[in-house]
Amino acid sequence: MEMVLRAPAEEKYAEELTRLKEADDGPRPPGWRLSARAVRRFILGDEALKVSRKFYGDDPLVDRAIVSLMGAQGLMMVGEPGTAKSMLSELLAAAVSGQSGLVVQGSAGTTEDHIRYSWNYALLLAEGPSARALVPSPVFQAMRSGGIVRFEELTRCPPEVQDALISILSEKTIAVPELGESQTLRAKPGFNVIGTANLRDRGVHEMSSALKRRFNFETVHPISDPGFEKELVLKELAERLAGLEAGSEIDPGVIDVLVQTFQDLRSGRTKEGTSLSRPDAVMSTAEAVNVVHAAALEAAFLDKAAVSGAHIARQVQGVVLKDNPEDGKKFKAYVDHVAKDRSGGNAHWKAFYQTARKLKLV
Ligand SMILES: Nc1ncnc2c1ncn2[C@@H]1O[C@H](COP(=O)(O)OP(=O)(O)OP(=O)(O)O)[C@@H](O)[C@H]1O
Ligand SMILES: [Mg+2]
């Protein structure tokens, strides 16, 4: 296989999907490549089949999402940034329909054409409207093949454009009047839509209630269990560093410092129960993975040393200092009190504290 920076889920986990398919003896919903139970195993892991766990922290949510995809409504995942909404929708699409590449990226520039279809104008002029001149949108393709289409950041599209989905979700058809009166695309079984929306951006309250009613909403929360978060960070780090020439060892104690810092600042409360002022910055698991990745790169390529609390401290500041200057003060207070108290008996917290206190945070 050619080296690429990021392969889609169905390629990355092709072997797992094949094993799941071979062992799959459960009933398959119409149009699905796998049974609902195999889809669940793909996402939550299965030791016997050597299938890795990919989503941590909320197993019932995965079950509800799968059930929702079998039903008549679409699935809408909402939540804070970096809570794995996109990842989960990619994994679901890969497992259910064997491909996760049918995606509409919602933005202020999204038009109805991106949801329905448009034309290849050279062909349209040359031979008039024909099936050949029609350029199907990802939604159109998913209806035609009976697959899942993902709609990323749906709420960033203008509401009147979003509403093009209403008839698609209720009638499961797209009319193409240019090709003749009776030309209507009817969705094959297996078709459904997974939308994602970020609660920090323009909110779901701007979605029309007609469209809301056609989706099942699921809120994805940040991982609250430090043990799960640590496991995930270590796993993602190993994946990201695989194949690098300069390997870098990492002491799990360093990850504890990182995960605890994120958990404390995210929740506004230390594990000992002291209240903190919570920064506005998004302290998601996805950010934690980025921090430890950057720390490991710095350690391996610039320092030729093992990753330490000092590397973590230097990288965390880039996450905390993003938009609100007050956040720097809040982080400083955390360093001066919580990190300092912990630095007494623990070498990793000590390295973290000694570097963090020298950072220019305010
Ligand atoms: N509960 C979780 N289980 C597994 N991975 C998680 C979890 N939470 C966060 N992650 C990490 O977050 C990364 C990507 O998050 P993703 O881009 O899917 O988030 P998102 O919710 O779509 O964010 P955004 O709203 O910014 O688009 C994953 O690759 C994974 O490393
Ligand atoms: Mg996303």
Image (spheres, grey):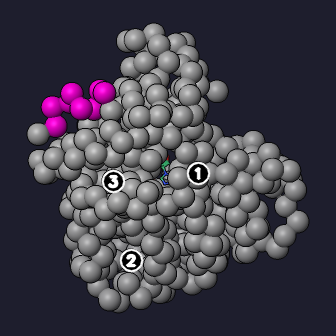
The residue pinned by badge 1 equals 227
Q: CA distance from mark 3 to mark 1?
A: 17 Å
Q: CA distance from mark 2 to mark 3?
A: 38 Å
Residue at image position (45%, 65%) is 221
Q: Are marks 3 and 1 in contact (CB under 8 Å)?
A: no
Magenta span dominant secondary structure: loop
Q: Is residue 52 magenta?
A: no
Q: Nearer the viewer, residue 189 or 123?
A: 189
> Residue 290: x, y in percent?
40, 38
Residue 265, labelled with which disc? 3
Mark 3: amino acid: Leu
Is residue 8 shown above or below 199?
above
SS at badge 3 = helix
Mark 2, ligand 2, within 8 Å: the answer is no
Mark 2: amino acid: Leu
Mark 1: amino acid: Gly
> Residue 165: x, y in percent?
38, 77
The tag earlier along the polypeptide, 2 or 1, is: 2
Is residue 186 shown above or below 314?
below
Is residue 321 shown above or below 309?
below
Q: Are marks 2 and 1 in contact (CB under 8 Å)?
A: no
Q: Magenta segment, which residues?
A: 354-361
Residue at image position (26%, 37%) is 317
Q: Are marks 2 and 3 in contact (CB under 8 Å)?
A: no
Residue at image position (46%, 28%) is 347
The residue pinned by badge 2 equals 165
SS at badge 1 = helix
Q: Nearer the viewer, residue 256 or 341?
A: 341
Q: Quadrant of residue 35?
A: bottom right
